[in-house]
């Protein structure tokens, strides 16, 4: 029953994170658009960082929900390994974008 309640409450967060991934410029301006006369231009590194943060938050949220639903240590281990692999891959990719 607790897992169901967590899923219900975390579903809007998933939707916001998906929106943030597909519209990073809009999400960076959310609630701050009034501060600018024109839309500011964000660097490619800033857009990549927002996408990285959105996917990272979705992965962490998935690990939390999966650990509530499943009692298998193998599933938890695979999800945490996927998280670390994604972090390592994305850090190298972001570093490459920032240095160029």
Image (cartoon, rainbow, N blue to C red):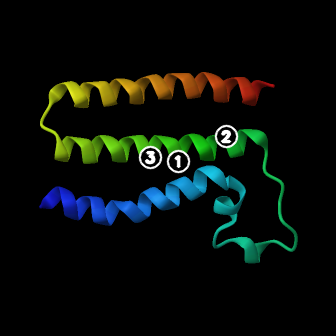
Q: Which circle marks residue 98 in the picture?
A: none
Question: In the rendered image, which residue does mark 1 sit on?
Answer: 54
Q: Earlier in the sequence, mark 2 or mark 3?
A: 2
Relative placement, left or right, of 20 versus 61 is right
The residue depicted at 16 percent of the width and 28 percent of the height is 73
Q: Residue furthest right?
A: 38
Relative placement, left or right, of 42 versus 15 is right
Q: Residue furthest bottom?
A: 34
Number of residues whose C-alpha sits closer than 10 Å to that of mark 3, classed few (under 14), some (14–19) or many (20 or more): some
For the residues labelled 2 and 1, say whether their Cβ atoms are less than 8 Å apart: no
Give above or below for 86 relative to 31: above
Question: In the rendered image, which residue does mark 2 sit on?
Answer: 48
Callout 3: SS:
helix
Q: CA distance from mark 2 to mark 1?
A: 10 Å
Callout 1: SS:
helix
The image shows a total of numbered marks equal to 3
For the residues labelled 1 and 3, say whether their Cβ atoms are less than 8 Å apart: yes
Number of residues whose C-alpha sits closer than 10 Å to that of mark 2, classed few (under 14), some (14–19) or many (20 or more): some
Number of residues whose C-alpha sits closer than 10 Å to that of mark 1, classed few (under 14), some (14–19) or many (20 or more): many
Nearest to the observer: residue 23 or residue 35: 23
Nearest to the observer: residue 43 or residue 16: 16
Classify residue 74 by image quadrant: top left
Nearest to the observer: residue 86 or residue 43: 86
User: In x, y percent, where is residue 99?
Assistant: 76, 25
Question: In the rendered image, which residue does mark 3 sit on?
Answer: 57
The residue depicted at 26 percent of the width and 48 percent of the height is 65
For the residues labelled 2 and 3, say whether their Cβ atoms are less than 8 Å apart: no
Nearest to the observer: residue 48 or residue 1: 1
Callout 2: SS:
helix
The residue depicted at 69 percent of the width and 62 percent of the height is 26
């Amino acid at each position: 029953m607790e897992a169901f309640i967590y899923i219900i409450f975390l579903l809007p967060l998933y939707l916001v994170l998906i929106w943030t991934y597909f519209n990073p410029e809009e999400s960076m301006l959310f609630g701050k658009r009034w501060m600018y006369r024109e839309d500011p231009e964000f660097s490619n590194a800033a857009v990549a960082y927002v996408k990285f943060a959105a996917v990272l938050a979705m992965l962490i949220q998935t690990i939390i929900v999966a650990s509530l639903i499943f009692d298998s240590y193998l599933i938890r281990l695979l999800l945490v390994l996927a998280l670390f692999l994604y972090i390592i891959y994305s850090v190298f990719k972001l570093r490459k974008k920032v240095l160029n």
